[in-house]
Amino acid sequence: MVAMTEITRLPTRPGTAMSLSAAGLSVLVLSLGSPTAAVVSLLAGVTLAGGLTRGSRRVLDVAGGLYFLSLVAAGVGTAGVEILLLAAITSILAWDIGENALSVGDHLGRETETTRLEVVHAATTVLVLTVGAGVVFALGLAASGGQPVTAVVLLLVGVIALVAGMRR
């Protein structure tokens, strides 16, 4: 007879490690552009770690909101476009990998070997985010010919809002 054990429904260890690594990279990148943004990103990373420790989606969502605020602080400050895009990639990556670690841990348990699954998820996320950032960077270069970058960003936000509104 096989002994049954209770599943530990907490985030997986590989996913937690990758998520916190991306969070640290986010702080490092933002420290190059804005000390205030780096502090907010550090607070987001600590919140993310707390959410992963407790296995709480709400706390992870709060961390995601703090990451957004860190990007806004960097954008308002003196951070360049390259730093903002790299910080956006690392921040989204930290949050997404954390969410995935929580989901996988909830479904399969913390004890299950999930490293390969989570590395593939993280690599795919990096690829998608990098391609997206490349498109945004190219659009910014092409569209900013003499115009303030703020106008280009607001135009892109307006287009996204218009497309989102049309889909509903």
Image (cartoon, rainbow, N blue to C red):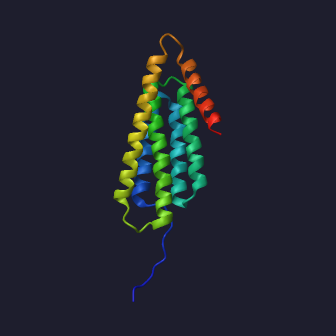
Query: Which residue appears at 50% of the width and 35% of the height?
Result: 38
In the rendered image, residue 44, in percent from the top left (x then y), is placed at: 54, 44
Which quarter of the figure has residue 134? top left
Q: Tell me, yes or no, if residue 69 can be seen here.
A: yes
Of 61 and 1, which appears nearest the observer? 1
Task: List the single residue furthest toward the top.
Answer: 146
Query: Which residue appears at 57% of the width and 18% of the height?
Result: 151
In the rendered image, residue 54, in percent from the top left (x then y), is placed at: 55, 60
Image quadrant containing the C terminus: top right
Task: List the single residue furthest toward the front.
Answer: 167
Query: Which residue appears at 58% of the width and 36% of the height?
Result: 69
Number of numbered callouts drawn: 0
Task: List the single residue furthest toward the left.
Answer: 116
Q: Tell me, yes or no, if residue 31 can be seen here.
A: no
In the rendered image, residue 100, in percent from the top left (x then y), is placed at: 47, 54
In the rendered image, residue 99, in percent from the top left (x then y), is placed at: 50, 53
Query: Which residue appears at 51% of the width and 67% of the height?
Result: 9
Which quarter of the figure has residue 162? top right
Image quadrant containing the N terminus: bottom left
Indicate whether 72 appears above or below 108: above
Indicate whether 17 appears above or below 32: below
Indicate whether 35 appears above or below 155: below
